[in-house]
C-alpha cells in the first residue's frame, strides 16, 4: 500500500513539474525550435536530420561525401572541397521570423585565400546573398576569420570575428540573430569583432528574416562555389535566438545533451524527446 501511494504521489509531482517546470530548472530549447539538426553519427544514413521536421539532405557536387569516425561528438561529415549536402526547402527551414541561431563544429583541411562555407540557406529567387549563412572568410579579405550573415526586410548585415583559425583544428562557431542585433560565438564565447569594413560583433540588425524557398547547403555557400574541405559536425539551426549559456553548453556537450535537455539542478537530466508534451 505504501509503495502504491508513493508511486501515485510521484506521478502527480511529475505531471505538475512537466507542465509548469521544475525547481531550479534552467530554460532550454524545445524540439519544435530546432528546425534542423545533422549529427553525422550514422554512417549508413549520413545526411539524416535528427530533429522532428525530417529535413534530410542529399549529396551534391562532383566530389566525395564521406563519413569519418573522427568527429567532435561521434562521427562527422568529411568533404573534399568539391561536394556538399543539400536539403530541400521546407516550411521549417524557411525562417521568416525575427530570430535565428546557426551553429556547427568545423575542422578545415587547409586555410588560404578562399572562402569555405559551413552552412547556408540560399537567398530567395537566386539573390546573391544568403538568408542565413556561416562562412570562413578568405585570408585576402579583412585578414580572414568567420562571418555570420542574416538577410532581413531591412537589408543585409554581416558580422565577423577576428582571424585566429588554423587548419586541422576543431572550432565551434555560432551565429545568432535576435531581432535587434547579430552575434557570433567562437568556442562557446562571444568573440571579438573584426572591426573592419563594418564587420562588428555584435552587429546591429532588425526586421524579419527574408523568407527563402531555396535549398539549405551544408559545406557550400549561396553561390555554389565556396565549398568546404575538411570535417563538419553537429550542425544545428534554431528558429529562435539561443542564449549565451545555451551556446556554451552546445559547444561543450553537443546540441542534444547541452541544449535539448531539462536539467533539474544537476540531479536528473531528461531529454525532451522522452517527455510527452
Image: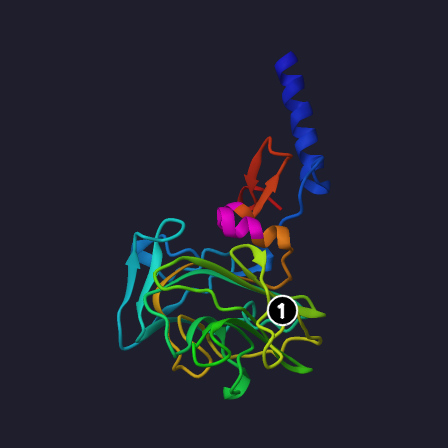
**Residue pictured at 58% horizontal, 78% vertical:** 196
Q: Is residue 253 located in the magenta-colored stretch of the structure?
A: yes
From the viewer's perspective, is residue 260 above or below residue 116?
above
Q: Residue furthest top?
A: 1
Q: Which residue is mark 1?
A: 201
Location of the N terminus (image quadrant): top right
Residue 276 position within the rendered picture, expressed as x and y whole percent measured from the top left: 59, 43
Q: Is residue 70 visible?
A: yes
254 relative position to 22: left or right: left
Q: Is residue 60 visible?
A: no
The dominant secondary structure in magenta is helix
64 relative position to 135: left or right: left
Judging depth in this view, the residue of 104 and 90 nearest the camera is: 104
Which residues are the magenta region?
A: 248-257
Q: Quadrant of residue 25?
A: top right
Q: Secondary structure at mark 1?
A: loop
From the viewer's perspective, is residue 270 above or below residue 197?
above
Amino acid at each position: 500500500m505504501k509503495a502504491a501511494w508513493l508511486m501515485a504521489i510521484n506521478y502527480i509531482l511529475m505531471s505538475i513539474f512537466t507542465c509548469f517546470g521544475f525547481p531550479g530548472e534552467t530554460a532550454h530549447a524545445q524540439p519544435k525550435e530546432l528546425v534542423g539538426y545533422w549529427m553525422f553519427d550514422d554512417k549508413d544514413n549520413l545526411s539524416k536530420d535528427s530533429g522532428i521536421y525530417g529535413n534530410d539532405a542529399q549529396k551534391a557536387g562532383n566530389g566525395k561525401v564521406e563519413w569519418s569516425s573522427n568527429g567532435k561528438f561521434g562521427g562527422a561529415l568529411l568533404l573534399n572541397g568539391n561536394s556538399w549536402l543539400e536539403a530541400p526547402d521546407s516550411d521549417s527551414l524557411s525562417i521568416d521570423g525575427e530570430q535565428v541561431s546557426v551553429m556547427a563544429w568545423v575542422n578545415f583541411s587547409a586555410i588560404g585565400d578562399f572562402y569555405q562555407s559551413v552552412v547556408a540557406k540560399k537567398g530567395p529567387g537566386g539573390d546573391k546573398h544568403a538568408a542565413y549563412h556561416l562562412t570562413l572568410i578568405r585570408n585576402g579579405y579583412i585578414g580572414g576569420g568567420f562571418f555570420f550573415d542574416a538577410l532581413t526586410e531591412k537589408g543585409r548585415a554581416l558580422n565577423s570575428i577576428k582571424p585566429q583559425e588554423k587548419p586541422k583544428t576543431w572550432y565551434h562557431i555560432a551565429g545568432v540573430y535576435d531581432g535587434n542585433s547579430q552575434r557570433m560565438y567562437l568556442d562557446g564565447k562571444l568573440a571579438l569583432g573584426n572591426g573592419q569594413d563594418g564587420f562588428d560583433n555584435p552587429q546591429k540588425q532588425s526586421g524579419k528574416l527574408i523568407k527563402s524557398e531555396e535549398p539549405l547547403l551544408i559545406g557550400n555557400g549561396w553561390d555554389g562555389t565556396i565549398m568546404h574541405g575538411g570535417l563538419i559536425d553537429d550542425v544545428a539551426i534554431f528558429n529562435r535566438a539561443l542564449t549565451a549559456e545555451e551556446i556554451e553548453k552546445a559547444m561543450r556537450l553537443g546540441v542534444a545533451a547541452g541544449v535539448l535537455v531539462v536539467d533539474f539542478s544537476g540531479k536528473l537530466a531528461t531529454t525532451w524527446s522522452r517527455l510527452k508534451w
